[in-house]
């Protein structure tokens, strides 16, 4: 089935947890929203602060990474209520892309500069 969720702004990136129970959407509004796929409803949101260009959830589901137009990459601890910001990294220019190495040992980022 096709599911539609109203994020409230243009959605730029999505991720789903490995169990298929939570959808994450990052958007131009600077938020990463959490959606409960079991009941097809909004669950919560975190404020990245600037338009989110990309999000990634680690394979174990413990970390959510979001990158934004202002060059900030945030790492969120999904085991904390909220979830809680665990780290923040700033590029000189706009964040263009990021990836995790196999096993999640390293986060590789690039900016638009």
Image: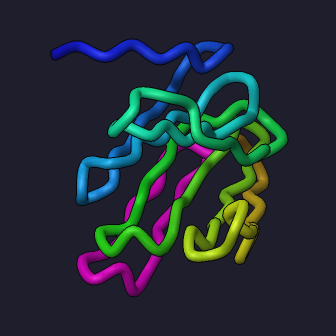
Look at 47% across and 55% down and name the residue there.
98
Q: Which residue lies furthest to the left in this view?
A: 1
Whole-percent x, y for residue 48 in the image: 76, 46
Confirm whether the magenta stretch covers residue 103: yes
Q: Which residue lies furthest to the right in this view?
A: 49
Work out whether 37 lies above or below 57. Answer: above
Give the mark count: 0
Whole-percent x, y for residue 95 in the image: 63, 46
Whole-percent x, y for residue 100 in the image: 37, 69
The answer to whether residue 112 of the structure is visible from this angle is no
Confirm whether the magenta stretch covers residue 43: no
Look at 74% across and 24% down and name the residue there.
29
> In which quadrant of the rendered view does residue 99 lie?
bottom left
Work out whether 101 lies above or below 56. Answer: below
Image quadrant occupied by the N terminus: top left
- The chosen color scheme is rainbow
Q: Answer with left or right where residue 39 lies relative to residue 102.
A: right
> In which quadrant of the rendered view does residue 113 lie?
top right
Look at 78% across and 41% down and name the residue there.
70
Work out whether 91 lies above or below 113. Answer: below
- What's the magenta region? 95-113
Q: Nearer the viewer, residue 1 or 89?
A: 1
Look at 46% across and 33% down and name the residue there.
13
Q: Answer with left or right where residue 104 lies relative to residue 78.
A: left
Q: Which of 73 and 5 is in front in this view?
A: 5
Work out whether 108 lies above or below 52. Answer: below
The answer to whether residue 6 of the structure is visible from this angle is yes
């Amino acid at each position: 089935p096709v599911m539609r969720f109203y994020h409230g702004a243009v959605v730029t990136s999505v991720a789903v947890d490995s169990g298929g129970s939570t959808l994450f959407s990052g958007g131009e509004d600077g938020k990463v929203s959490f959606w409960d796929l079991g009941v097809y409803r909004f669950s919560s949101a975190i404020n990245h602060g600037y338009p989110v260009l990309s999000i990634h959830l680690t394979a174990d589901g413990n970390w959510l990474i979001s990158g934004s137009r202002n060059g900030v990459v945030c790492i969120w601890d999904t085991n904390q209520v909220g979830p809680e910001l665990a780290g923040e990294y700033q590029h000189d220019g706009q964040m263009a892309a990021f990836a995790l190495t196999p096993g999640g040992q390293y986060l590789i980022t690039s900016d638009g500069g």
